[in-house]
Image (cartoon, rainbow, N blue to C red):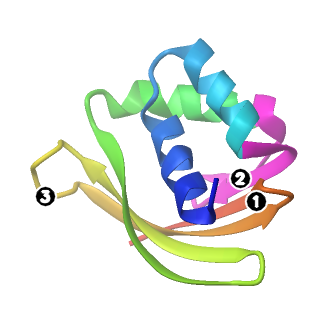
Amino acid sequence: MNRTDLAQKYIEIWNERDAGRRRAAIDVVLTEDSVYSDPDWEAVEGRDGIDTMIGRAREKFGDLAFSLGEVINEHHDLMLFTWHLGQPGEPPVATGYDVVRFEKGAIRRIDGFFV
């Protein structure tokens, strides 16, 4: 799986409402020691922590869905891309940027920024 595919699969994790399917995807896309942070979450560590955090966030989002925006740039083991949150076919209610670090064919770290 190439890095853009991994970024897309990562976005799909945020949209997955079924806990079992979400966890199975997390186990494929994220390293065991992965770390997530954004303005709302300082540092969530490990697959279990990230899974719990996304599950809680998913409850708040209701019918809103994430979509991958533009891959702005990538170099070495890093990628910068945009994302959107909203109802499909409507203007997004939130947008942001993620900086993702890859390691051994998976995502090791995600640092999110809201616009």
Tell me the crowding category of disc 2: few under 14, some 14 to 19, or many 20 or more residues within 10 angstroms, Cα based: many
Query: Which one is nearer the viewer's eye here, 66 or 103?
Result: 103
Q: Position of residue 41 (x, y in %)?
A: 65, 51
Looking at the image, residue 41 sits to the left or right of residue 33; the answer is left
Q: In the image, is residue 77 above or below residue 15?
A: below
Q: Kindly state the secondary structure of the residue where label 2 is placed.
A: strand
Residue depth check, mark 2 versus mark 1: number of the one nearer the observer? 1
- Count of labels in the image: 3
Q: Residue 62: within the magenta?
A: no
Q: Position of residue 78 (x, y in %)?
A: 70, 76
Q: Main secondary structure of the magenta part?
A: strand
The type of residue carrying mark 2 is Tyr
- Are the residues flagged by discs 2 and 1 in contact, CB closer than 8 Å? yes
The type of residue carrying mark 3 is Pro
Q: Which residues are magenta?
A: 30-49
- Residue hosting label 2: 36
Q: Residue at x 71, y 53 (%)?
A: 36
Cα distance, mark 2 to mark 1?
Answer: 6 Å
Work out whether mark 3 precedes mark 1 in sequence or the reverse, and give the earlier one: 3
- Residue hosting label 1: 109
Cα distance, mark 2 to mark 3?
Answer: 26 Å
Q: Residue at x 46, y 40 (%)?
A: 12
Q: Residue 40: within the magenta?
A: yes
The type of residue carrying mark 1 is Arg
Q: Position of residue 29 (x, y in %)?
A: 69, 43
Tell me the crowding category of disc 3: few under 14, some 14 to 19, or many 20 or more residues within 10 angstroms, Cα based: few
Work out whether mark 2 precedes mark 1 in sequence or the reverse, and give the earlier one: 2
Query: Which one is nearer the viewer's eye here, 24 or 86?
Result: 24
For residue 91, which numbered disc appears in the image? 3
